[in-house]
Image: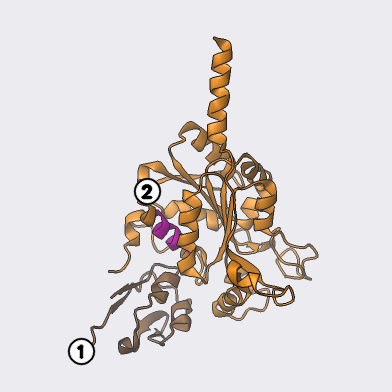
Amino acid sequence: MEKKLPTIEVIEKYCKGCHICVEFCPTKVLEMQGFVVGVKNLEACIKCMQCELRCPDFAIKVTA
Amino acid sequence: MAFEYEKWLRPGKLPHIWCPGCGHGIVMKGLIRALDTLQLKKEETAIVSGIGCASRLPGYMDCCTLHTAHGRAAAFATGVKMARPEMNVILCGGDGDGTAIGGNHFIHACRRNIDMTYIIMNNMIYGMTGGQFSPCTPTGAKASTTPYGNPDPGFDIAKLAIGAGASFVARGTAFHANQIDKLIVEAIQHKGFSVVEILDDCPTTYGRRNKYKSVIEMMNRLKDIAVPVKAAEKMDPEQLKGKVLTGVLYKEDKPEYCEQYKAVIERAQGAAR
């Protein structure tokens, strides 16, 4: 059975590029794409929601 | 489903003014999750703040908010609570606003044990006014007014609050984001003056002067120094050197001020008859 992937929405207008989500993601799903954050490897996401919890700028939304 | 923070935010206010990597946004999200967990009504929730970076928080929140004079959040909030005891009054502010300029208001609000929740975001510096040292700046740390190192020892806000008579004292950090809302929920549910100190980072005015290369280093510092209260019970004093306890540090049932004051009014009215 195929694994159901979550969706990670990044609101680029709000992202200030602080790196917190990229650094503390346990499976390195996110990366910096220029000034703002982007999704690099969605398959590795374990839906721990730490990026959404720790984003100070309300810029990440994870829907499991 | 992703959590809907928007229902507690004023429309069109984001992005907020806080610097990249500032922990105040994490604390605001924790507060919103706590308010949502408790299912509080917006018209019965008042958020009161003084002046400073952390005190910008009520400006983004969609409920009853009050942005008052520097350090005077506790005084204004006491007024709100006395006039409308059914309101859930939440104060927020930084360490400078709460313990230096508003130090007197803070200790006397603790002493009275009035039913309010004070969220102190301790970033160890005055961020908004240009990085002056605050009462929570540690010894030896550099600030714009202590370029050769701060000679003063810093306050321990939790111990200060317990000493002054607060009946609920908890501490969390901006790194441990999923703990923040649980502490705030418990603080709001507690009847009496509750203090929640959140250790925070200020990469712009503190980190830059104190050789933190990035926000990540500041966040890692919070991760390293925090020790949960239960884990600390099994540790030696030697291991706890330089560490900070997190979790619920103190809880006590004490007479609450609004009820005490109501009793005084009834006694006075009885005497007049």
| Amino acid on which the number 2 mark rests in the picture | Leu
Residue A27's image quarter?
Answer: bottom left
Residue at 45% across, 61% down: B181
- What residue sits right under mark 1 in the picture? A2
Give the chain letter at badge 1: A
**Stretch in magenta:** B27-35
Q: Which mark is residue B176?
A: none
Which residue is at 57% across, 20% downward? B267
Considering the numbered disc 2 on the image, is that residue within a helix, a strand or a loop? loop
User: Are dots 2 and 1 on a single chain?
Assistant: no
Which residue, as the protein is rendered here, is positioned at the far top?
Answer: B273
Residue A55 appears in the figure? no
A12 and B179: which is toward the camera: B179
Q: Is residue B204 magenta?
A: no
Apparent side of residue A56 relative to residue A13 in the rendered image (left or right): right
Q: Amino acid at mark 1?
A: Glu
Question: Measured from the top left, where is residue B218 in percent x and y?
Answer: 59, 75
The kind of secondary structure element at disc 1 is: loop
- B241 or B78, which is in the foreground? B241
In the figure, the brown chain has which letter? A
User: Given contact means CB atoms under 8 Å apart, are the residues at marks 2 and 1 in contact?
Assistant: no
How many C-alpha atoms fall within 10 Å of the one at disc 2: few (<14), some, or many (≥20)?
A: few
Residue visible at 73% across and 73% down in the picture: B237
Residue B32 in percent (x, y) is at 41, 58
Residue B79 appears left or right of B101: left
Q: Which mark is residue B40?
A: 2
In this structure image, what is the colour of chain B?
orange
Check the residue under mark 2 and report the chain it is in: B
